[in-house]
Image (cartoon, rainbow, N blue to C red):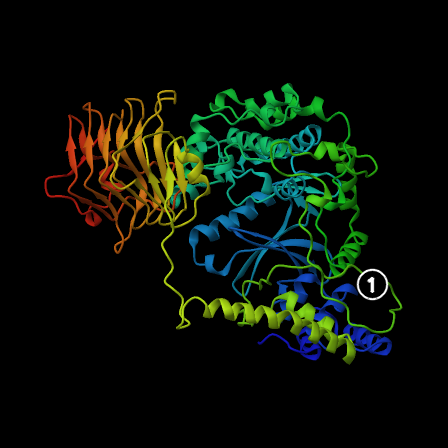
């Protein structure tokens, strides 16, 4: 239904939703009207209800959007939205009879008919239910409510490591050692109990609660390694599963064959992130990161954080060894290595790192804690005894520094919160006001609730309007006079500028952007880092640079300045087996009028990844490469805008070289699964090598969409 425009319409939605008992809501409103006038706007009454603990932040935003249905999932009432990921949305809920808080993960309705997603969702429930450990999120139930599939899990009152590092920067090394050891113990339990491999260990999947207890979550990609029937990866032909920033080398090649040592590698990458505030490989495409995990070493931790002890850095290096046989072979071995670093107790996380819930959610939590079973209380005490934690005290600011990361841990470094909507004027309350309603993102409905279109009004506009209504007529008149004094001159100035452009009150056509000149010592790499979509680069002189990259930029042109012959040469000091330039998902890219010279060192000259409709390589000479002139890897144009190679002159020097090579690595995680929609016009190939080649032409090249000259065929090459 439409968004409410009055407080009464808002309250009617609250009544219809059933989130508040009718008697309780009626009693509250009667007391409110006795002490003061009910705010006329939906925003005003929403803020009062949230402040007084009647409804939650999430519920208030849903009502303000006109949504009142489906605030229950099975036997659970929805309180807050905790987060969302690829496999579903997680809500903080309360059992309607037992009043216990839980986390309920809901599978998106658009994935219900996806057999892979549905089976993986239920396997997550199976994986979590098989485990019972203080460092793993527990599962309580699984169910379906009107085609809504959900898993009921333990609610962890805390934040994940990704969120914490984003807020406050890299952590103190000893603190990270505590968290990583707890994580390793959780993985060891999963490994030795049921042979489970998580396959997606990363900072976002490791929670830290308010007491400093670590909980591993999200078993959506987990696999029972010793169960031959657990073959979803093979069943749905999913070659790569996990997160590229933390993926073990062997997992990128075959997710199904990954064992517990892949989780150890990912935990090492998480360790690295917590200490440095950056992933092991911060730049590059997904495909590049997958390759670099197999071939490159991350930047040494101590070059980023010199205060990290050498022994601790060595532990991370061993956990992230490329060869799985050189890593710790079980999580327990890693936990044992970290044990000496965890003998000194650490304080709980500072309060500013933890999530802030509404009063209604906190009140529900208090009831839940009061009704905790003796077994749960005993479990909680045992967790605290195994991880002794002293009285809460904040971490020193010095230990939260973010050397080399650009972040600080000071409160001033955090983005300032937007002021909440003001409370309408009125007599003093008999009880002190509670925490004000904070700014929130645009509301997201429960998956089954159809969201009606609503007119978006910026909160700042609403805020100004409410402020104006609080003043008397004289004050309002002063505001209007002040606004007129500002708006009238500004309007006249804009009108004068518009009329002064020409006598007919029409703007002159905009001039094309001036080209960026690169030459005479200017670095092309530095220019590519700061260009915008549509920029044109003219090379005014020869350049000597290598391993440049351009990602997700549109309509960029690099060409020789008109009238000049330009050579782009591979630098003599650069390491061999690299490229001149790597292009990833760059629609409309143009490279023309240049000689590309690999100096008999460059493995390839140009590499294309991803979807780049309209990209064109034109009037280029390619020579002196060691393997390939151009590499096309999982790259596609479109039927309307194919990728075009026009008037290329490519010279090979040996039989094993390929002018243009089409490939689709098995470990690639790019959306495109084949190379398609290419046009080759008036291209010239010479030398003993192959003109056009592919290692697996039957699956990597869509021949039907290729437009090739009649005398050129795609040959199979090693």
User: Left of 293 or right of it: where is 621?
Assistant: left
Residue 463 horizontal/vertical position (percent): 69, 68
Residue 370 shows in the view: yes
Residue 239 shows in the view: no
Residue 95 horizontal/vertical position (percent): 70, 59
Relative depth, front residue between 136 and 641: 641
Number of numbered discs? 1
In this rendering, is residue 257 above or below 458? above
Residue 72 horizontal/vertical position (percent): 63, 65
User: Left of 164 or right of it: where is 678?
Assistant: left
Q: Residue furthest left?
A: 711
Mark 1 Cα within 10 Å, few/some/many (few <14, many 20+)?
few
Name which residue lies at 86% across and 63% down. Answer: 432
In this rendering, is residue 567 above or below 436? above
Residue 417 horizontal/vertical position (percent): 69, 54
Relative depth, front residue between 134 and 718: 718
Relative depth, front residue between 514 and 29: 514
Name which residue lies at 53% across and 39% down. Answer: 200
Q: Mark 1 points at which residue?
A: 433
Name which residue lies at 55% across and 32% down. Answer: 269
Residue 300 in which image quadrant: top right
Residue 493 in which image quadrant: bottom right
Quadrant for the C terminus in the image: top left
């Amino acid at each position: 239904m439409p968004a409410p425009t009055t407080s009464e319409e808002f309250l009617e939605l609250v009544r219809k939703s059933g989130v508040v008992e009718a008697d309780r809501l009626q009693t509250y409103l009667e007391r409110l009207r006795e002490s003061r006038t009910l705010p006329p706007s939906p925003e005003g009454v929403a803020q009062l209800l949230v402040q007084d603990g009647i409804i939650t932040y999430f519920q208030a935003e849903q009502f303000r959007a006109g949504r009142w249905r489906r605030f229950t999932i099975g036997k659970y009432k929805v309180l807050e939205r905790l987060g969302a990921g690829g496999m579903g949305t997680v809500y903080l809920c309360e059992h309607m009879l037992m009043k216990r808080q839980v986390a309920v993960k809901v599978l998106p309705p658009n994935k219900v008919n996806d057999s892979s997603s549905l089976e993986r969702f239920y396997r997550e429930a199976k994986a979590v239910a098989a485990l019972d450990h203080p460092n793993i999120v527990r599962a309580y139930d699984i169910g379906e409510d009107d085609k809504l599939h959900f898993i009921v899990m333990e609610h962890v009152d805390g934040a994940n490591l990704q969120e914490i590092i984003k807020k406050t920067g890299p952590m103190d090394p000893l603190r990270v050692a505590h968290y990583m050891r707890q994580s390793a113990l959780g993985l060891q339990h999963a490994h030795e109990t049921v042979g489970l491999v998580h396959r997606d260990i990363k900072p976002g999947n490791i929670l830290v609660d308010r007491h400093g207890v670590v909980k591993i979550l999200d078993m959506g990609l987990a696999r029972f390694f010793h169960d031959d029937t657990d073959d979803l990866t093979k069943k749905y032909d999913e070659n790569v599963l996990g997160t590229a920033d933390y993926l073990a080398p062997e997992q990128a090649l075959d997710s199904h064959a990954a064992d517990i040592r892949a989780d150890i590698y990912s935990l090492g990458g998480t360790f690295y992130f917590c200490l440095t505030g950056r992933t092991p490989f911060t730049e590059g495409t997904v495909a590049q990161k997958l390759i670099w995990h197999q071939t490159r070493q991350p930047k040494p931790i101590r070059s980023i954080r010199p205060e990290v002890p050498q022994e601790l850095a060595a532990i991370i290096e061993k956990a992230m060894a490329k060869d799985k046989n050189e890593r710790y072979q079980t999580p327990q071995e890693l936990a044992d290595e970290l044990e000496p670093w965890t003998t000194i107790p650490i304080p709980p996380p500072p309060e500013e790192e933890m999530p802030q819930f509404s009063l209604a959610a906190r009140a529900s939590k208090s009831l839940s804690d009061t009704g905790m079973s003796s077994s749960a209380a005993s479990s909680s005490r045992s967790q605290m005894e195994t991880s002794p934690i002293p009285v809460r005290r904040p971490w020193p600011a010095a230990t939260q520094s973010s050397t080399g990361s650009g972040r600080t841990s000071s409160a001033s470094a955090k983005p300032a919160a937007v002021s909440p909507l003001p409370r309408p004027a009125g007599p003093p309350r008999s009880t002190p006001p509670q925490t004000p309603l904070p700014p929130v993102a645009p509301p997201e409905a429960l998956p089954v609730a159809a969201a009606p279109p609503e007119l978006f009004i910026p909160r700042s506009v609403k805020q100004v309007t409410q402020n104006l209504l609080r003043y008397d007529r004289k004050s309002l008149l002063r505001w209007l006079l002040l606004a007129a004094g500002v708006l009238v001159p500004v309007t006249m100035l804009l009108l004068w500028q518009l009329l002064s452009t020409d006598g007919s009150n029409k703007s002159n056509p905009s001039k094309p952007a001036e080209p960026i000149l690169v030459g005479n010592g200017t670095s092309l790499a530095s220019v590519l880092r700061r260009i915008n979509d549509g920029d044109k680069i003219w090379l005014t002189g020869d350049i000597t640079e290598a391993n440049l990259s351009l990602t997700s930029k549109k309509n960029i042109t690099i060409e020789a300045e008109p009238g000049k012959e330009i050579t782009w040469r591979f630098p003599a000091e650069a390491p061999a087996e690299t490229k001149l330039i790597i292009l990833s998902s760059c629609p409309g890219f143009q490279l023309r009028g240049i000689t590309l010279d690999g100096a008999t060192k460059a493995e390839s000259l140009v590499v294309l990844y991803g979807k780049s409709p309209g990209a064109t390589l034109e009037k280029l000479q390619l020579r002196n490469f060691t393997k390939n002139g151009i590499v096309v890897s999982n790259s596609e144009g479109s039927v309307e805008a194919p990728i075009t190679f026009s008037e290329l002159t490519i010279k090979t020097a040996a039989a094993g070289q390929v002018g243009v090579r089409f490939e689709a690595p098995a470990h690639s995680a790019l959306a495109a699964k084949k190379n398609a929609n290419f046009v080759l016009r008036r291209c010239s190939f010479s030398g003993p090598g192959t003109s056009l080649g592919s290692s697996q032409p039957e699956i990597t090249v869509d021949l039907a969409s290729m437009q090739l000259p009649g005398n050129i065929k795609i040959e199979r090459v090693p």
